Image: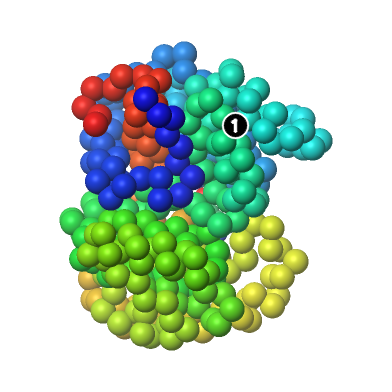
Amino acid sequence: MALRHFLTLNDLSPAELDHVIARAIELKAEHRERRQSVQFPNYVLGMIFEKASTRTRISFEAGIAQFGGHAIFLSPRDTQLGRGEPTEDSARVISSMCDIVMIRTFEHSIIEKFAEYSSVPVINALTDDYHPCQLLADLLTVKEHKGDLAGLTMSYLGDSANNMANSYLLAGVTAGMHVRIAGPEGYLPSADIIAAAEDRAAETGGSVLVTVDAAEALLGADVVATDTWVSMGQEDEKEARLQLFRGYAVDEAAMKLAAPDAVVLHCLPAYRGYEIAAAVIDGPQSIVWDEAENRLHAQKALMAWLMHRSGLAVVEGLD
Ligand code: CP
Ligand code: NVA
């Protein structure tokens, strides 16, 4: 059985994505009933964090604990990762002692190299280019609120060259959605990412629209999403960025253009008054708290699926 990793949404076929989301819904229901049909006693999750986190750390650590396993939190400050040990050496060693590894880091190439040398599944817990675990939770949340994902229009506004924009694009079309991305010139997804998303859209019946016109992206949207204008690592550009993205805020005026029953996503942390108005994130269309909780259920389903498909565990009910 081939080792499976989850570095971007390209690592799941449309059918596999559907399967993981369906499994997450089951695991969430079990969690509510305080049942746990899936068990990984003594399994160890290595968690490498080179950037800060609240949700990702808690959801992965709680998730593996609920499976009966254990997590090890590894930060560059306290390990040799911060002293320049080569990624390939770290990958060989860490994967020889852990059963699954998640990594939050900077350049996407770091996680690709780690996965190349790892003997266990590797999960992208955010790189500069992608945040695919967040999209598992987002799609699960939209499915709970809206039913079938295929055919829905999902619009993302703001910094459209960042990890969340890329992830909305790829995940949305994998689920058969019509994805619209709006941001200023120079801050839009790269040609390569648009091409990958268009290939997926051709397979699923979804579509891609990338525009500088926020209103064009918003018109009639079923799902409206945004993210911080200043991602981790961009703190020095903060003042310029707050000006640059001003026309792409998800505020009450923007929401008037979307469908009346549109739902609002934000991966959090949110900065009220910048990328999203307080009235929107704290208002009736916001589903961000379900979205945050769903990180737990979606990643449990993902971990179980990766271990099952990589031949490291047998989980009943998984393909
Ligand atoms: N959305 C998200 O990944 O949050 P954290 O940075 O808190 O993990
Ligand atoms: N784009 C943000 C997402 C945080 C979860 C960042 O990379 O900081």
Q: Amino acid at mark 1?
A: Tyr
The answer to whether any part of residue 292 appears in the image is no
Left or right, 163 with reference to 181: right
Viewer-closest of 100 and 284: 100
Q: Residue at x 36, y 85 (%)?
A: 216
x%, y% of residue 1?
37, 25
The C terminus lies in quadrant: top left
Q: Residue at x 31, y 56 (%)?
A: 174
The answer to whether any part of residue 309 appears in the image is yes
The image quarter containing residue 159 is bottom right
Give the vertical position of 258 relative to 51 (above or below).
below
Give the vertical position of 110 relative to 95 (above or below).
below
Whether label 1 lies within 8 Å of ligand 2 gets the answer no
The image quarter containing residue 32 is top left
x%, y% of residue 256?
32, 82
x%, y% of residue 140?
30, 49
Question: Which scheme is used to colour this image of the protein?
Answer: rainbow
Q: Residue at x 31, y 47 (%)?
A: 13
Give the vertical position of 25 relative to 268 (above or below).
above
Q: How many numbered tags mark residues here?
A: 1
- As drawn, which residue projects farthest toward the right? 83
Q: Residue at x 50, y 22 (%)?
A: 99
Judge the density around disc 1: few (<14), some (14-19), many (≥20) Cα neighbours within 10 Å: some
Element assignment for label 1: helix
- As drawn, which residue projects farthest toward the top? 42
Please give the residue where the numbered disc 1 appears in the rendered image. 117
Give the vertical position of 241 relative to 110 (above or below).
below
x%, y% of residue 236?
75, 66
Left or right, 189 with reference to 204: right
The image quarter containing residue 178 is bottom left
Viewer-closest of 15 and 60: 15
